[in-house]
Image: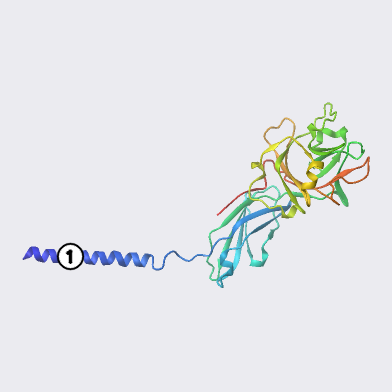
C-alpha cells in the first residue's frame, strides 16, 4: 500500500516537473527569434579630400517598414575621435566631413526603428586622402612628352607645398612616374622609360593590374585596401588601352623612396580621355591631364573589408 502511494506521488511529481519544463521553454521563446531591424549591406567608401570621405550602402530591408526611423553613423578615429551622425534614408551616399588626413576611421552604420532599437552594425575602415586637380590655381596637372621643356615626370606629392609637381629630367630623382611619347604613349614606372637618369634615379613606383573606367574619382568606391592588390613596375600603354576606355582611366599606384623597401604611399591617378584620346596638345608640347587621390601617410591603403 505504501509502495503504491509512493509510486503515485512520484508520478505526480514527474508530471509537475514536465509541466514546468514545457512552461519554461514556452516562455523563453514565445514567438521565435526576436524581431530586429535589418542592417545595411555592401557598405563602401571613397576619399573625397584630406578631411572628408563618402560612404554608400544598400538600404536595409527594414527601410520599407513603417517602423523604420533613421540610420546612425558612428565614426571612431585611431586618434580617439568619436562622433555619431543621424541621417535619413535620402542621405545615401553620405559625406563625412571634419576628419583628419593622418587618421584612420572605423565607420559603423546602424539601422534604427522607432523606439530607438538598433540593428547590428555594418562597418568599413577608411582614411581621407589628398585630392588634386591642379598644380596650383587654374593650372591643371599635365605631364608632357619628353620633347617638351615643361617636364615629362611627376612628383605625386611634394612635402613642402603638399601638392604634386611636374618635373624635367634635371630633377628626375624626385619623379614618381613619367611619360614617354613615340609611336605609343606610355605612362608609369619612371625607371622603365629608358631615359638617361645618370645618378638621379626616380622613386620606385609600382602599378596594380587592376584599373577603373569611370568619369570621376568621387565614385570610385571600395571595400578592400589598395595594398591587397598585386603591384609591379610597369608602363601602361595608353595607346593600346585607349579603345577599351569609355570614360577616363584610373590607375592604382604605390610608390616608395629609393632605399626604403617597407614604406609605400598609395594613390589613385585619373588620366583624362578627352574627345576620345588620352594624348592632348600639339607636337612638341603634347601631354596627358590627370587628377590624383594621394594618401601621404605611409602604408595606409584607404580601406579595409566591411564587417557585418
In this rendering, is residue 209 above or below 19?
above
Q: Quadrant of the C terminus?
A: bottom right
Question: What is the residue that sits farthest to the bottom in this orientation?
Answer: 66
Q: At which x and y percent is residue 24? A: 32, 65
Question: What residue is drawn where x is 66% and y is 42%?
Answer: 229
Of residues 263 and 246, the one nearer the viewer is: 246
For this view, does 52 lie left or right of residue 63?
right
Quadrant of the rendered image containing residue 279: top right
Quadrant of the rendered image containing residue 205: top right
Question: What residue is drawn where x is 67% and y is 67%?
Answer: 90
Q: Is residue 239 visible?
A: yes
Q: What residue would you read off at disc 1?
A: 11
Q: At which x and y percent is residue 7? A: 13, 63
Q: How many marks?
A: 1
Q: At which x and y percent is residue 40? A: 58, 60
Q: At which x and y percent is residue 139? A: 88, 49
Display colour scheme = rainbow
For this view, does 194 lie left or right of residue 13?
right
In this rendering, is residue 264 above or below 247?
above
Q: Residues within 10 Å of mark 1 (few under 14, many from 20)?
A: few
For this view, does 125 lie left or right of residue 200?
left
Quadrant of the rendered image containing residue 174: top right
Q: Is residue 159 visible?
A: no
Of residues 130 and 3, the one nearer the viewer is: 3
Question: What residue is drawn where x is 67% and y is 62%?
Answer: 92
Question: What is the residue that sits farthest to the top in this orientation?
Answer: 198
Question: What is the residue that sits farthest to the left in this orientation?
Answer: 1
Element assignment for label 1: helix
Q: Quadrant of the N terminus?
A: bottom left
Question: What residue is drawn where x is 14% and y is 66%?
Answer: 8
Amino acid at each position: 500500500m505504501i509502495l503504491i502511494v509512493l509510486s503515485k506521488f512520484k508520478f505526480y511529481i514527474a508530471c509537475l516537473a514536465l509541466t514546468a519544463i514545457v512552461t519554461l521553454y514556452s516562455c523563453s521563446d514565445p514567438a521565435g527569434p526576436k524581431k530586429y531591424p535589418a542592417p545595411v549591406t555592401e557598405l563602401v567608401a571613397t576619399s573625397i579630400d584630406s578631411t572628408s570621405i563618402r560612404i554608400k550602402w544598400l538600404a536595409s530591408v527594414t527601410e520599407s517598414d513603417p517602423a523604420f526611423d533613421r540610420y546612425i553613423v558612428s565614426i571612431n578615429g585611431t586618434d580617439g575621435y568619436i562622433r555619431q551622425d543621424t541621417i535619413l534614408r535620402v542621405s545615401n551616399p553620405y559625406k563625412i566631413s571634419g576628419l583628419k588626413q593622418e587618421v584612420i576611421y572605423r565607420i559603423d552604420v546602424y539601422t534604427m526603428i522607432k523606439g530607438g532599437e538598433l540593428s547590428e552594425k555594418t562597418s568599413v575602415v577608411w582614411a581621407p586622402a589628398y585630392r588634386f586637380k591642379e598644380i596650383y590655381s587654374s593650372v591643371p596637372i599635365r605631364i608632357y612628352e619628353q620633347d617638351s621643356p615643361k617636364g615629362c615626370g611627376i612628383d605625386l606629392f611634394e612635402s613642402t607645398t603638399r601638392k604634386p609637381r611636374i618635373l624635367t629630367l634635371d630633377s628626375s630623382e624626385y619623379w614618381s612616374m613619367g611619360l614617354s611619347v613615340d609611336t605609343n604613349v606610355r605612362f608609369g614606372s619612371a625607371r622603365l622609360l629608358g631615359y638617361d637618369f645618370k645618378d638621379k634615379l626616380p622613386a620606385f613606383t609600382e602599378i596594380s593590374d587592376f584599373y577603373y573606367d569611370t568619369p570621376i574619382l568621387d565614385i570610385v568606391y571600395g571595400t578592400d585596401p589598395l595594398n591587397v592588390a598585386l603591384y609591379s613596375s610597369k608602363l601602361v600603354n595608353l595607346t593600346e588601352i585607349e579603345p577599351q576606355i569609355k570614360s577616363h582611366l584610373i590607375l592604382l599606384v604605390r610608390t616608395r623612396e629609393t632605399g626604403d623597401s617597407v614604406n609605400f604611399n598609395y594613390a589613385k591617378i585619373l588620366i583624362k580621355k578627352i574627345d576620345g584620346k588620352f594624348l592632348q596638345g600639339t607636337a612638341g608640347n603634347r601631354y596627358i591631364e590627370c587628377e590624383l587621390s594621394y594618401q601621404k601617410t605611409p602604408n595606409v591603403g584607404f580601406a579595409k573589408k566591411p564587417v557585418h
